[in-house]
Amino acid sequence: MTLFQLLSVPVFLKYWGVELYGEWITLNTLTAYFQMTDIGLNTATGNSFTFNYVRGQFEKCTILINNNIFFILIAFIAIFLFVVGLGRAGVFVHLFHFSLIQSSEVDTCLFLLFFQVMIGTFNNLLNTFYTATGNYARGIMIDNFIRFSEYAALLLSVVLKFSIVYVLLFGVLVKLVGFIGKFIDSSRFYKLSLGIRYLRRAELKETFLPALSFFSFPIANSLSFQGVTLLINFFLGSTSVVIFNTTRTLVNFCKSSIDILHKSVWPEISITYGKMDILRLRKIHYRTMAYSVVLAIITTIVLFFLGNLLYTTWTRGAVKFDPILFTLLLVSLIANTIWSSSTVLLQATNNHKKFSLFYLFAAMLIFIASLLVLAIIKQVRYIPLSILFVDILLVYYVVKRALSITDDSLSLFLIGVWAAIKDMLKLVSNIFFTISR
């Protein structure tokens, strides 16, 4: 998936050019706002479902899923009507002053993006069944195959010079077929029972507060990621959007392996927490932190020395490499890895409520600081300084909160992380020794 994301940049630049690609990025930033529709209920329900499933409380599992599906349907219908109203009022056309995307296509594109997000939301809900039954890897592999098909369809439609509307329509159809196939497969592990009789207000209230807390994460991300992108487009134009986003994408290549690790331990943490096995929970936390930090340091060093060459080759010289922007984003990546490695412990156990508010506040700081940088300095290269400052604050807060969940101390945590690092290095050395022999 990461390779496809990297491949898409030179393909877009070759067939669409910098300006149209910049407008495409701006248009796609709105998907982050559509993704807020479930207000985090999917994730909160998934955690609660897993806790109750491992405890044998299957009736409550059925109630949780039915409540979730009912709420999501109501929310998507309401948002769809709202989007239709804004479209007919011409809000989107006036909001985006695109020069290459036709005004008549803007509303259609947004509707198709909305349907993509809606299908994706229900598709993500199916991962709950895989997680609770110990088949999470299978569900993720199916998701990867669906994303692989989506990226392939996207690149193919761009190469064939389809209009943007047909590019998105092609993507919707691929996503829909993938969802149907995944639903059929998930039925092998959990038979979904639907009905009004399963709707319960008590269970909905139980998951609503954790869901609202999860809801703050996409809001915060929209401020610090999509919000900053929109600010850059407003102050400096689409060319600067491409420079910033391509540089951030290359740096985030480092995060791909780390994100895989975090997603892999999430279901293990939920199951272990449901069994209240605190000692195992500590061990998972130590290893997650150790492996993540080592991976981040290694990939950061490699990119620091090869960044210019990789970026220039990747963009085929169409976009100018900014070494200051690149270096600051790399430094921020290390701090981000530390706090995100502990965040998965908070989120997988539904103990993220206070952190979600702090994270939202941190995202607001990034947005305001980026606004000031763009308004005063008018350069994107110093925006990562605000991101780095917030990442350092998050390291202190998140690690402290995670240790309170595992009833751990900082000294024991550091000893456990160092022991995990030594085990990792020993394993790697044994592998190299075996290969050399």
Image: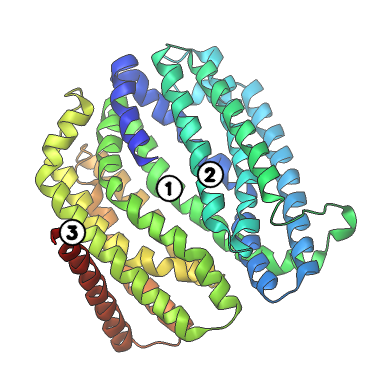
- Residue 432, image quadrant: bottom left
Q: Residue at x 12, y 37 (%)?
A: 308
Q: Residue at x 19, y 58 (%)?
A: 298
Which quarter of the image is occupied by the N terminus? top left
Residue 50, above or below 37: below
Determine which residue is flagged by label 1.
223
Q: 319 or 92, which lies in front?
A: 319
Determine which residue is flagged by label 2.
143
Residue 154, above or below 140: above
Q: Residue furthest left?
A: 305
Query: Label 3 amino acid?
Result: Ile
Of pointers 2 and 1, the one earlier in the residue sequence: 2
Query: Label 2 amino acid?
Result: Asp
Of pointers 3 and 1, the one earlier in the residue sequence: 1
Q: 370 or 38, which lies in front?
A: 38
Other residues around mark 1 within 10 Å, as few (<14) / some (14–19) / many (≥20): many
From mark 3 to mark 1, how far is it between C-alphas? Answer: 47 Å
Determine which residue is flagged by label 3.
435
